[in-house]
Amino acid sequence: MKRLAPSLRSALLAPALGLLLLAGLASPAKAQRNGSYEVNGTNPDGSSYTGMMTIQQVGLASWRVRWQIGQAQVEGYAMSVGPIFSVGFVIGDRPGMSIYEVAPDGGMSGQWTLVGSSAIGTENLTPR
């Protein structure tokens, strides 16, 4: 079997690697979708809560997010990269952030905190 010259091999390999990277990084989370999610979480103080989250895609990898927890409504914006879904939000006047891992079935599990807090909450999201 004849070996390709190093420069020809590089010329053929570089575009193929680039396409693989683009396929894995440029697309939004594969299981991510618009819609409603049931929320089950634990606050940083250990108390639990339930509610709903609605997400709406507003760009290639950007999303508008709205939680409804009891009477409280929290809004934020998110970005997805591969299986990671990250949200920035504000509760009252305190900014917060959450990071989720998206499962193949579209469910998400992650952690969240308010900026300046010394504790972390958890949250699980189940598609409806």
Image (tube, grey):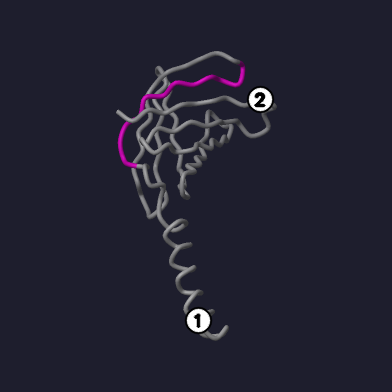
- Label ID, residue 73: none
Q: Residue furthest top?
A: 47
**Is residue 39 one of those drawn in magenta?**
yes
Residue positioned 32% across, 31% down in the render: 36
Residue positioned 36% across, 49% down in the render: 58
Which one is earlier in the sequence, the residue at label 2 or at label 1?
1
Q: 102 and 86: which one is in front? A: 102
Where residue 27 appears, x then y in whole percent? 40, 55
Where residue 90 appears, x then y in whole percent? 52, 34
Q: Is residue 119 left or right of residue 42?
A: right
- Label ID, residue 11: 1
Q: 38 and 93: which one is in front? A: 38
According to the picture, the residue beneath numbered tag 2 turns out to be 119
Q: Is residue 50 left or right of residue 9?
A: left
Amino acid type, residue under disc 1 in the picture? Ala
- Give neighbour class at mark 2: few <14, some 14-19, many 20+ (Cα, 10 Å): few
Q: Which segment is the magenta one? A: 33-45
Where residue 5 appears, x then y in whole percent? 55, 86
Where residue 124 appears, x then y in whole percent? 46, 26
Instruction: Tell me the CA gap for discs 2 and 1.
Output: 50 Å
Secondary structure beneath label 1: helix
The C terminus appears in which quarter of the rendering?
Answer: top left
Secondary structure beneath label 2: loop
- Give neighbour class at mark 1: few <14, some 14-19, many 20+ (Cα, 10 Å): few
Where 113 falls versus 27 (above or below)? Answer: above
What's the magenta bit mostly, secondary-structure-wise? strand
Where 10 falls versus 128 (above or below)? Answer: below
Q: 13 and 73: which one is in front? A: 13
Residue positioned 39% across, 42% down in the render: 64
**Is residue 82 one of those drawn in magenta?**
no
Amino acid type, residue under disc 2 in the picture? Ala
Q: Residue furthest front?
A: 1
